[in-house]
């Protein structure tokens, strides 16, 4: 029995099992090498191409965004320049309008002063004429009382009034002594 125990070694496989394992390994190796590996390679190539295409698209998009940013900044600078010109033009127009309004106000003030002076002169002339008539009447009444005669004659009355007014005007500061 010792011989039989030596033949059954669990660590040493049987030849048939080795042949079956080699054939199965060969079939599996062939299957993996011919079918699985090419599919993996194809998928890997597609993913690599997609990633490289994505990177290229991202670079193009980044370049496009940079160009759009430059264009935006240029437009913004133009808009700021134009806004500055518009502000300056508005400031100039405002100053011109202010000057024009001041001129119009000065012209209106001059017109009002001229009209007021004319009105004052007319009222002064009217007052002087009224005072002449009033003073003439008072002078003729006073002369009639002093002389004791009635100055019924208009010529005499007018001469008395004229002489009295001439005397009044010839006195300094118009004061009677």
Image (cartoon, helix red, strand yellow):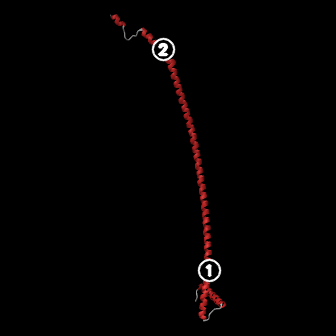
Label 1 residue SS: helix
Left or right: 126 in relation to 18: right
- Residue at the (53%, 26%) spot, across then down: 46
Q: Position of residue 50 (x, y in %)?
A: 54, 29
| Picture disc at residue 34 | none
The correct choice, above or below, for 176 with respect to 7 in the image is below
**The furthest residue to the bottom:** 148
**The furthest residue to the right:** 155
Instruction: Report the quarter where the N terminus lies.
Output: top left
- Residue at the (59%, 45%) spot, across then down: 75
Camera-nearest residue between 83 and 124? 124
The correct choice, above or below, for 93 with respect to 174 in the image is above
Cα–Cα gap, marks 1 and 2: 141 Å
Label 2 residue SS: helix
Q: Which residue is mark 2?
A: 27
Comes first in the chain, label 1 or label 2:
2
Query: How dense is the environment of label 1, judged by Cα within 10 Å: few (below 14), some, or many (20 and up)?
Result: few
Disc 1 or disc 2, which is closer to the eye? 1
Q: Position of residue 135 (x, y in %)?
A: 60, 86
| Picture disc at residue 126 | 1
Q: Position of residue 97 (x, y in %)?
A: 61, 60
Instruction: Report the quarter where the C terminus lies.
Output: bottom right
Query: How dense is the environment of label 2, judged by Cα within 10 Å: few (below 14), some, or many (20 and up)?
Result: few
């Amino acid at each position: 029995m010792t011989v039989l125990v030596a033949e059954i070694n669990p660590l040493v496989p049987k030849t048939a099992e080795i042949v079956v394992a080699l054939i199965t390994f060969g079939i599996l190796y062939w299957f993996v090498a011919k079918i699985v590996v090419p599919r993996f390679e194809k998928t890997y190539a597609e993913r690599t191409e997609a990633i490289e295409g994505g990177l290229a698209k991202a670079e193009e998009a980044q370049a496009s965004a940079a160009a759009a940013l430059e264009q935006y900044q240029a437009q913004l600078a133009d808009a700021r320049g134009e806004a500055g010109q518009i502000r300056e033009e508005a400031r100039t127009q405002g100053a011109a309008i202010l000057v024009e309004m001041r001129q119009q106000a000065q012209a209106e003030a001059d017109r009002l002063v001229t009209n007021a002076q004319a009105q004052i002169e007319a009222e002064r002339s009217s007052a002087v004429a009224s005072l002449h008539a009033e003073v003439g009447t008072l002078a003729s009444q006073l002369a009639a009382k002093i002389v004791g005669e009635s100055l019924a004659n208009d010529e005499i009355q007018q001469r008395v009034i004229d002489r009295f007014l001439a005397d009044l005007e010839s006195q300094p500061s118009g004061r009677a002594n």
